[in-house]
Amino acid sequence: MTRLEACKLDSWEERKRKVLSKLHFDFEIGEEFDRPLQKDDTPYMAHSLMDKGLADTRACAIGEALQGGLNNWALYKEVLSPILNCDIRNFRLLLDIEPRLIYNCLRSTGDRALVERLEGVLYD
């Protein structure tokens, strides 16, 4: 039986179950995606950061600060505070998963506290 023939026989629920199972197996995802959303309007960027392991509170603060889009340089001043409020583990993780975000924050703000945090991570 071909995939097309199987699709015709299966209900949408069965097809959904099979696809979810394949995603779980192939991409090793599952339970960590079952956690409830922070709220209905949580930005996509926040979900992406959470899925990569960043603490929910930090991911939501960064995502909300970036609501206007990454092309607006003024937003990097808004996202600077949530980045600097990350503990050392989350700061290192954020640097690993979104280095461009931190690079652009530093480039646009030149913030001294960010320079010090980066020196502590990059040179220690």
Image: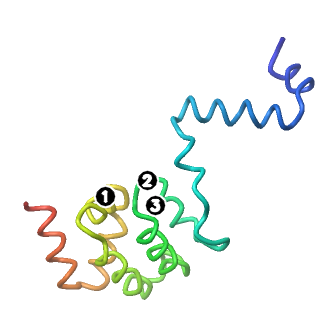
Q: For this view, does 24 lie left or right of residue 98? A: right
Whichever of callouts 1 and 3 sits on the residue coming sooner in the sequence is: 3
Mark 2: which secondary structure?
A: loop
Residue 65 position (above or below residue 52): below
Whole-number angstrom distance, CA of label 3 to CA of label 2: 5 Å
Q: Are marks 3 and 2 in contact (CB under 8 Å)?
A: yes
Q: Badge 3 is on which residue? A: 49
Seen as rendered, the residue at the extreme left is: 124
Q: Amino acid at mark 1?
A: Leu
Which residue occupies 67% across, 71% down? 40
Residue 44 in percent (x, y) is at 58, 65
- Specify the label residue 51 is tagged with: none
Q: Which residue is mark 2?
A: 52
Q: Position of residue 72 (x, y in %)?
A: 48, 82
Asked whether 106 or 6 is in front, the reply is: 6
Residue in the picture at 80% in, 32% down: 15
From the viewer's side, name the closer residue of 63 and 55: 55
Q: Which amino acid type corresponds to the residue marked 3 in the rendered image?
A: Leu
- Left or right: residue 107 versus residue 97 is left
Task: Give the colouring mode of the picture.
Answer: rainbow
